[in-house]
Image (cartoon, grey):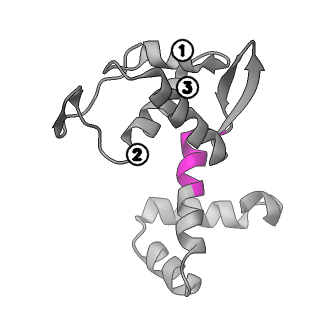
Amino acid sequence: MTVRQNPGKPSARGVRRGPGELESEVLALLWVARGAKTAAWVQSELAGNLAYTTVVTILSRLHDKGLLARARVGRAYAYTPVTDEAGVVARRMRELLDHEADRQAVLASFVSELSAADESTLRALLSSDAPAESRG
């Protein structure tokens, strides 16, 4: 599977990705992969002739952010995602909320802009029998 680059500013090596695009591409690749994968495997699957050190840096950053787990395989690490795409989006939303002084205003604004179907889903989730700690 080859992940295609999106058009952007050209660089000496080809097309330059936007901020966070490479991390997103690596995560998408690992989500569909079966089992833990090394940097060499990720490098071979990504488009754009990326340097091995670039791939290792991206994998290390994703690990440092808590998005990937890693285990030693010989002299290298093999990486696996710790959550799916929905989990990553939820985490980003939570991080944004954590940086706001008026959480209630942010949540109120967010909820006021939900579609009727999303509001209904949110109400159902909040009124479920699931323990509060599993919701956040």
| Residue in the picture at 50% in, 19% down | 42
Location of residue 135 in the rendering, given as x and y in whole percent from the top left corner: 73, 60
Task: Look at label 3 and name its amino acid.
Answer: Leu
Give the mark nearer the N terminus: 2 vs 1.
2
| Residue in the picture at 54% in, 14% down | 40
Q: Secondary structure at mark 2?
A: loop
Location of residue 19 in the rendering, given as x and y in whole percent from the top left corner: 35, 48
Judge whether residue 100 is colored magenta: no
Task: Look at label 2 and name its amino acid.
Answer: Gly
Magenta: main secondary structure equals: helix
Location of residue 132 in the rendering, given as x and y in whole percent from the top left corner: 80, 66
Instruction: Give the crowd class for mark 2: few <14, some 14-19, many >=20 residues within 10 Å.
Output: few
Give the mark nearer the N terminus: 2 vs 3.
2
Q: Which residue is mark 3?
A: 30
The mark found on residue 50 in the picture is: none
Pick the front one: 101 or 18 = 18
Q: Secondary structure at mark 1?
A: helix
Q: Total marks drawn?
A: 3
Which residues are drawn in magenta? 83-91
Query: Is residue 88 depicted above or below 71 in this figure?
Result: below
The mark found on residue 20 in the picture is: 2
Instruction: Report the mark closest to the observer, 1 or 3.
Output: 1
Location of residue 20 in the rendering, given as x and y in whole percent from the top left corner: 40, 45
Residue at the far left in the pictured view:
10
